[in-house]
Amino acid sequence: MEMGLKEDETLEDLQLKGLVLLQKKQGFRFGMDAVLLAHFAAIREQDTVVDFGTGNGILPLLLIGRNKGTRFFGIEIQETSADLARRTMMLNQLEDRVSILHADVGDAEQFFSPCSVDRIICNPPYGQPGSTLRSPFSDRAIARSQQQETLRRFFTAGFRILRGRGTFSLVYPAPQMLYVMELLQACHLEPKRFQLVYPSADRPANLVLLEAVKDAKPTLHPMRPMIIYEQNGDLTNELKSVYHIGVESGGSIRP
């Protein structure tokens, strides 16, 4: 596995505890949804966390930067993305804390014992089959175009490896919130906490952050809505705190 920066790659400074991220110049690149999910997820410092569909490994990095979790595993089906994630962890000297598995999420039981994982985090494919335009870049298309039964396989695998009362946290388009909640319940993961994300106060929500608990009782706890931009186009103070603007280096992860 080559460590050097390749011609089609960029090295991003996350401006978060000195962490860096390898990304492809053309292809899937992380966005605000990953940052919001890392902020939202209720993960204790001592937890073991599995990232379903880790891509280039951005979520484990963001969680480490927020002192959430102690041991991480990222499962990624695309070989090129798994290679990026592994090299990213080596660049950050995190290979002892973050293991990247080139595998299908549906095969998670081959790597983890039943009921052995504290938390699962996931930024899953968004598009329903036939409802989204496919990307001209194959890895971006896989990352953003949901294949039939993908979510059900993710949730089923999550149920099997999560401990009792373990949590599954994800981000998804707000208009499909009911669909995701019903599917989680069908897989014995009870939605317990959610937060709607609004681009601005005068626009409809476009994302929902969800946390489900294994074999929990059906009680739903809505959180205060999150608004991204002020009317003048500036980030709200809440988003500035999510991005650590003015907290650590004065910079931010780019939305």
Image (spheres, grey):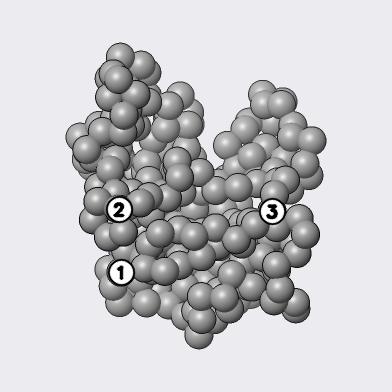
Give me the disc on residue 250: 2
Structural crowding at the residue carrying mark 1, measured as other residues with C-alpha within 10 Å and reported as few (<14), some (14–19) or many (≥20) = few
Q: Camera-side residue: 253 or 213?
A: 253
Q: Tell me the quarter of the picture where residue 146 sits.
A: top right
Answer whether labels 2 and 3 touch (C-beta < 8 Å): no
State the residue lying farthest toward the front: 250
State the image coordinates of residue 246 (x, y, percent, origin top left): 24, 51
Spatial CA distance of label 1 from label 2 is 19 Å
Q: Amino acid at mark 3?
A: Lys
Q: Is residue 34 above or below residue 20?
A: above
Name the residue beneath numbered marker 3: 24
Secondary structure beneath dot 3 equals: strand
Q: Is residue 245 above or below residue 183?
A: below
Whichever of callouts 2 and 3 sits on the residue coming sooner in the sequence is 3
Name the residue beneath numbered marker 1: 67
- From the viewer's perspective, is the residue at label 1 or at label 2 nearer? 2
Query: Which quadrant holds the N terminus?
Result: bottom right
Residue at 29 percent of width and 49 percent of height: 245
Q: Amino acid at mark 2?
A: Gly
Spatial CA distance of label 1 from label 3 is 27 Å
Q: Camera-side residue: 160 or 99?
A: 99
- From the viewer's perspective, is the residue at label 2 or at label 3 nearer? 2
State the image coordinates of residue 94 (x, y, percent, origin top left): 49, 79
Whichever of callouts 1 and 2 sits on the residue coming sooner in the sequence is 1
Q: Is residue 252 visible?
A: yes
Residue at 55 percent of width and 48 percent of height: 30
Residue at 38 percent of width and 46 percent of height: 36
Residue 156 left/right relative to 200: right
Q: Camera-side residue: 11 or 89?
A: 11
Q: Is residue 162 visible?
A: no
Whichever of callouts 1 and 3 sits on the residue coming sooner in the sequence is 3
Answer whether labels 1 and 2 touch (C-beta < 8 Å): no
